[in-house]
Amino acid sequence: MPDRSRLPERPDEASLGLGTAASFEVQPTFERFSQRDDIFCRSFWDPEIRSESTDRFYATYRDVLANWRTVDGFTQRDYALRNASWHVTDVFAERREEEDRREGYLDELTALRDAPAEQAEFESPAAAATEIKRVAKLFGADLVGITDYDERWLYSHKYSRVRESPKPNEQPGGLSHVIVVAKAMDHGLIATVPSALSGTATGWGYSEDTLTLLALSQYIRNLGYQAVPNLNDTALAIPLAIKAGLGEYGKLGLVITPEFGPRVRFGKIFTDLPMTLDAPRSFGVREFCDQCNLCVRECPVGAIPAGDPSDVTYNRSNIVGVKKWTVDAEKCFGFWERQNSDCSICIRVCPYNKGWPGWLFTAWRRLAGSPLRRVALWLDRALGGGRRRTASSWWKGN
């Protein structure tokens, strides 16, 4: 596949779900993003980011900090559970490290069996899409969407942890579709943010996604088609999820889904299986975010912008040439490393992050998407939305 670091804006941008309705608008100056510039990759090679606290931050995912802080949510038990939640993902990441691969983080997953030469036939692309979604949910996906293979969102280069340099991002030929799956993170754990315990929701979300992606990819391969599963590697998940109709872009820099708000983790499968594509969805997130700004006010380091979407970039970890709300990744990661666990305060306080019964959340979401969105915001706060829960209360089952 040719490596094109600069690609023109497509004429049918709105139909791809990356127009103004999604607050994610591609500009003519767009440049493909290199994974080496991702803030987590930079924390290994960039002296502006890496420090002793960075190294300690990563070490806590291996060595539990028994006595680091005598603070609720950062006990040995909290770290022990968080680290255990990442175990499945880490096993696959480490299985081929001697080959300069960290699968799921920096490289696609490859724990798959060979495919037969014969391809199973489907009645129609629509029938294929329906079957794939059914199987994906059987294998653990909470949400599934399908979009076209869009080279713009592939990393221009992958990142080599061994050499601390870019490496080619080569994909098989003939890939035409992308299946995007989402796994909801536990609402109760997210309510304890910021804490080491809350990181369990993130780790287990990735571990479950890994199992879903591998099983679904093997099923597709068993039908005689290509399937390349990946988590955070290979391509940017957010624009693909928007295109696949899984949600709308929010001010906190994440996809807000109608079902779970921003409380999801995404995985992708590239395939040549012909399927009908899903249409992007708009349900009033842009207008609600303009009124809300809770994530802006609650971010402890001011990493989330308060203004309108723009093409501003704060540092090399931001995408060039996309008009959107952009989070300052350096400020965000700096807070992560200082507290020795990932932070999801913006997810916790987002009014779309609900643990309410389905019918009640549906009613609230419709209100939030109407001219009465201020009333929806007031109701969310009045009913305790976004309130932090102590980790000790989670352990007690309260």
Image: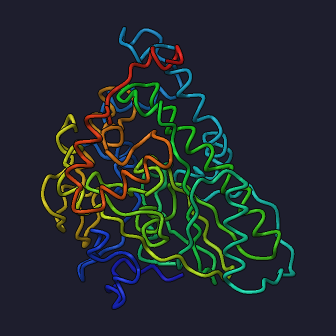
Please state the horizontal and vertical placement of residue 130, each as a whole percent of the image.
68, 72
Residue 214, horizontal then vertical, whole percent: 70, 56
In which quadrant is the N terminus drawn? bottom right
Q: Position of residue 173 (x, y in %)?
A: 63, 82
Q: Is residue 304 left or right of residue 345?
A: left
Image point (58%, 33%), residue name: 85
From the viewer's side, name the closer residue of 318 and 125.
125
Q: Is residue 90 left or right of residue 234?
A: right
Q: Is residue 23 left or right of residue 355?
A: left
Above or below — where is 101 with respect to 69?
Answer: below
Q: Residue at x 61, y 43 (%)?
A: 207
Please name the colour scheme applied to the rendered image. rainbow
- The one nearer the camera, 249 or 200, is 249
Residue reaching furthest bottom? 11
In the figure, 279 relative to 215: above or below? below
The image shows a total of numbered marks equal to: 0
Residue in view at x 27 percent, y 68 percent: 23
Query: Could you tell me residue 284's position as x and y percent?
Result: 30, 64
- Vertically, is 12 above or below 170? below
Q: Locate residue 47 relative to residue 363 in the image: left or right.
A: left
244, 169: nearer the viewer: 244
Measuring 34% from the left and 56% from the top, which residue is drawn there?
37
